[in-house]
Image (cartoon, grey):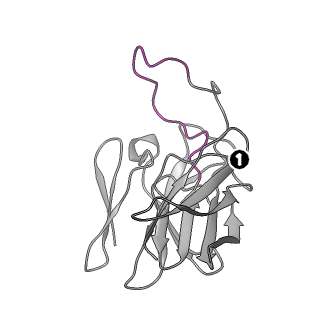
Amino acid sequence: MPSLTIVDNTDGQVHALVFRSGTGQLVCAAPVLAEGGAGSENSPVGIGRSVFVASTYGYPYPALPEGAGPAMPPSAPFTGGMTRIDVADDRCHTVWENRVRSAAVPRLSTADGALYTITRVGHGHTTPLDGYAFTVLDPDPGMVTASHSLPGTIVDDPLQTAPLITHNGRLFQGTVTGILRVG
């Protein structure tokens, strides 16, 4: 069943909404990101009947451009978090939630089945001194299987952009000041 998934970003608890391609019919909805921040500006990652949603709520983006109006709320902590839902028999089922602080749009590799992202590493609250780590997750239980620190701090902030995974397994991640190559 080809489908499209979005996050509704409603106040309070957000939901993943799965729609049938072609007709736009709502297949199912499920609450997501209950463990982390309640919102996502990123595209959900989907493969087969599984959908992965990463929280961006409270992410410390650069200042709003002039005339953009105030942020609502003005500030919030970035706690991160991801949710995996599976779709079967026109129902959404939450498989897991975690507290991974993804600083980039996660990517799922069909070659090795791993979920890749860059995570923000800090001491419980977000500061310009936070570091970053190349992080690999097992998408079945949602657990981190590997994490490697990256050099730099705020200059290496990926600002929730999507990485590129090449056919030979290298990951290229855009940052505030350039591109990082991992692998």
Check disc 1 and report the residue beneath it: 124
Is 22 situated above or below 64?
A: below
Q: Is residue 55 visible?
A: yes
What residue appears at the point 69 percent right and 65 percent down from the top-left corner?
A: 97
Q: Secondary structure at mark 1?
A: loop
Vertical relation: 168 (above or below) 66 = below
Q: Residue at x 35, y 41 (%)?
A: 176
Query: In the image, 180: left or right of 122?
Result: left
Residue 55, horizontal then vertical, whole percent: 59, 51
Work out whether residue 13 or residue 65 is closer to the camera in this orientation and state it. 13
The residue type indicated by label 1 comes to Gly
Q: Quadrant of residue 60?
A: top right
Task: Please tell me which residue lies in front, 76 or 39.
Answer: 39
Magenta region's main secondary structure? loop
Q: Which x, y percent locates residue 170? A: 30, 72
Looking at the rendering, in which quadrant would you find the C terminus? bottom left
* Residues drawn in magenta: 55-70
Q: Position of residue 37 (x, y in %)?
A: 67, 47
- What residue occupies the far bottom of the structure in this picture? 112
Q: How many marks do you count on the picture? A: 1
| 65 sits left or right of 15 in the view | left
Q: Is residue 119 above or below residue 1?
A: above
> Is residue 143 in sight in this rendering?
no
Between 165 and 11, the one lying in front of the other is 11
